[in-house]
Image (cartoon, grey):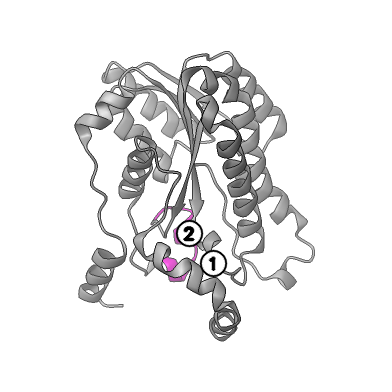
Amino acid sequence: MNSALSKIVKKILYPAPKINSQKLKQKFKGQWVVITGASRGIGEALASRLINCGAKLILVARSEDKLKALYFKALENNCEVKISITDLRNREQLNAFCEALRQQPDVKYVFCNAGKSIHRKIMDSIDRMHDFDRTMDLNFKALTSIGLAVLPNLQKNHGKIIYTSSVSCLYPAAPKWSAYHSSKCAANIWCQTVDNELKTQGVRVQIAYMPLVHTQMSDVTEIYRKMPAYSAEEAADILLKLSISDKRCYKPWWAWLTEVPAFCLSPIVRKIYNLIK
């Protein structure tokens, strides 16, 4: 896709999110916010945005150097900040992080942004059960473990969990994404269930069905590197805009129009998948 056409497509399919910066500061200034996957991509952009809002941050990721850079950036802006060098796929490390969260009674917002994507055919996964373990451990089990750890405090604080999902979960299952989509769809159901059960008790769980975002994770897939997409900073603004609203979820405008027809026409969609796989 040439540069001019790519810009037009991006403007139409990925319109820049508009967010009220003043309202953002009013909502987040002085509030404790947890961000998973905080060292790069959307998580790093979220952390930077919230530092500028004066939020108090709990940042968790595996990359010590990048977390420390955010730590010092927060201190320079007079923000309270805690960092946790944690591999959320590791059960022992995850349990330790969750126990620390239980001791943090003032948590108001939790952005569950850490995720893993695997693009591989089923027949190439025959001897790779660890592909499914890794994606479920991070995309589903880490989310639910952290959620269960913070829910009592979120209930007291009328807080929120904001989960970064994928717009692809709204459509018939695509080839080569069995591990990724299984984990994301499981996480979506958990989030929807918690929101249904606890909304009247002061807890909201919001899902962002995010379209393509240019990050280190997505750009591993060559075709995605060349496609129009949101930047990490734009995606962060989408999550923040969702978090200060009362909406149940975010979907790109075109997903609202195509989700139901795609399932109604799923036999045709599957044939298209077979043509392009």
Is 261 placed left or right of 52 in the picture?
right
Element type at mark 1: loop
Classify the position of the C terminus by image quarter.
bottom right
Q: Position of residue 87 (x, y in %)?
A: 61, 35
Task: Write the residue at 37% across / 58% down.
Answer: 252
> Most extreme residue toward the right, as rendered?
127
Element type at mark 2: helix
Instruction: Give the residues in magenta.
Output: 214-224
Query: Taking 237 as reference, is 73 above or below it?
Result: above
* Labels 2 & 1 near each other (Cβ < 8 A): yes
Is 13 placed left or right of 116 in the picture?
left
Task: Write the residue at 32% across / 33% down.
Answer: 48
When asked about the image quadrant of residue 153, the answer is: top right
Q: Position of residue 240 (x, y in %)?
A: 35, 38
- Which residue is labeled 1 in the image? 171
Q: Position of residue 184 (x, y in %)?
A: 59, 52
The disc placed on residue 167 is: 2
